[in-house]
Image: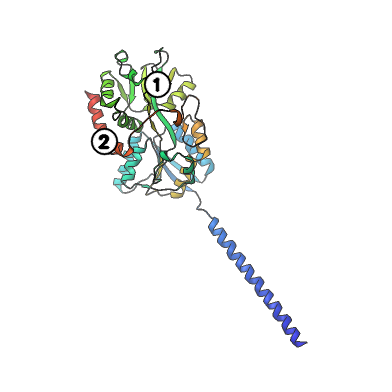
Amino acid sequence: MRKWMLILMFGILMAFAAGCGSKESSETSNASEDTNNTEAKVEGSLHFYTSQPDADAAKLVEGFQAKYPDVKVETFRSGTEEVISKIKAEKMAGKIQADVLLVADAVTFESLKEEDMLQAYETEEATEIPSELIDPDHTYFGTKVMATGLVVNTENVKEMPTSWNALTSKEVKGKIIMPSPLYSGAAAYNLGVFTRQDTFGWDFYKNIAANDVTVTKGNGDVLKGVAGGEKDYGMIVDYLVTRAKAEGSPVELIYPEEGVPVITEPIGIMKDAQNVEAAKAFVDFVLSEDGQKLAAELGYTPIRKGIEAPEGLKTIDEIKVLSEDVQELYKTRDADKKEFETVISE
C-alpha cells in the first residue's frame, strides 16, 4: 500500500510540474509575440518641408493627422529653391529641422542624396509605384505625375495652339509668361530638359526672351496672369489649369505635340530626422491608396497604379514625355540657371 501511495504522489507531482512548465512556456511565448507585434508609437512633432501650394499642403497634413492624431505637423512651405536653401542653411548652422521633404523634382533630391542628407526607407507602398519613378536606393519616391504644358486664355485666344512654338511666334510678343527656374523646381527641371532636346535647345529660351516674356516667381503667378487676361499664353504645370478651369476661369490646358517634361514631386526622409517613425508614417500615407485618392481629389494625377487621373489631365501612359538623365541635370543645374539669367537679361 505504501508503495502505491508513493507512486501516486510522484505522478501528481509530475503532472503539476508539467502544468507549470506549460504555463511558463505559454506566457513566454505570448510575451514574445507581444514584443514582436509591438510597433513604435507614431506621435510627437513632425517637421514637413514642401513646395506644394499652401492649401494642398494643409489638406495633405489634415488627411495624415486623421490617421495619426498624436502627431503634430509643423509645415514650412515655399518654392523648391527656397526650401532647399533653408535646409542647407540649417545644415550650416549644425541642425536640420526638417524630418520629411516633398518638393518638385528628382534632380533636387539627387543633390541632397549626393550630399548624404537623405536616408533610405523600404516602404511597402513602393510596390504600387512604377519603379522608374522612384530612386533605386529608395531615398525618395515620386508622389504624383505633373506635366508642364501651355495655359491659354480662351477669351483672348480663339484658335488653340498645338505646339510649343506658340511661345516664340512674333504675334504673341509681350503676351507670354513663365515661372522662373531660380525659384520653381519644376521650371528648373524644364529648363534642363528643353535645352537638351535637339528640337529646342537654348534657342528656344532665347526666342522666348526675345518675345518680351514675363518671368514670374512660380506657377501660381503664371496662372493668375493668364486667367486674369494680363497675358494670353503661359508655361505651367498641368493640374493648376484644370483646377482653375473647373472653377470657371477662362483657361485651357494644352499638351504640345512635341511632348512635355514631367516631374513627380518626390518625397523623402532627411538623414538627421528627429522623428523617424512619424516621417516613415507620413511617406507611407502619401503613397498609400488613401493618400493617392486624396491627391486625385486635389486635382493631381496620382502616381499609384489603379487610381484614375482627374478629368482633363492625362496619365503617364497617355503623355509623350520629354526627359533627360537625372544625374546629368543635377550636375548642370547651377550652370543652367546662370545661363538662363544671361539669356533673359539680354
10 Å crowding of disc 2: few (<14), some (14-19), many (20+): few
Q: Quadrant of the C terminus?
A: top left
Q: Number of numbered discs present?
A: 2
Q: Position of residue 142 (x, y in %)?
A: 42, 38
Q: Is residue 63 in sight in this rendering? A: yes
* Outermost residue, front side: 198
Rendered view: 273 above or below 300: below
Q: Is residue 72 visible?
A: no
What secondary structure is found at the residue carrying circle 2? helix
Residue 54 appears in which quarter of the rendering? top left
Question: Where residue 222 sits in the image (x, y, percent)?
Answer: 37, 23
Distance between the Cα atoms at labels 2 and 1? 27 Å
Mark 1 and mark 2 in contact (Cβ < 8 Å)? no
Q: On the rendered image, what quadrant is the N terminus found in?
A: bottom right
Q: Quadrant of residue 318?
A: top left
The residue to which callout 2 is attached is 334
Query: Farthest residue in the bottom direction?
Result: 2
Residue 47 image point, x, y percent: 41, 43
Among the two numbered marks 2 and 1 on one chain, the one whose residue lies closer to the N terminus: 1
Residue kind at label 2, given as amino acid type:
Asp
Q: Which sits in the foreground, 4 or 81?
A: 4
Kindly identify which residue carries mark 1: 151
Residue 31 picture location, percent across and down: 57, 62
Q: For the residue labelled by badge 1, is the local secondary structure a helix, a strand or a loop? A: strand
Q: Nearer the viewer, residue 1 or 305?
A: 305
Q: Is residue 83 above or below residue 273?
A: above
Residue drawn at x 48%, y 43% as measured from the top left: 127
Name the kind of residue labelled 1 in the image. Answer: Val
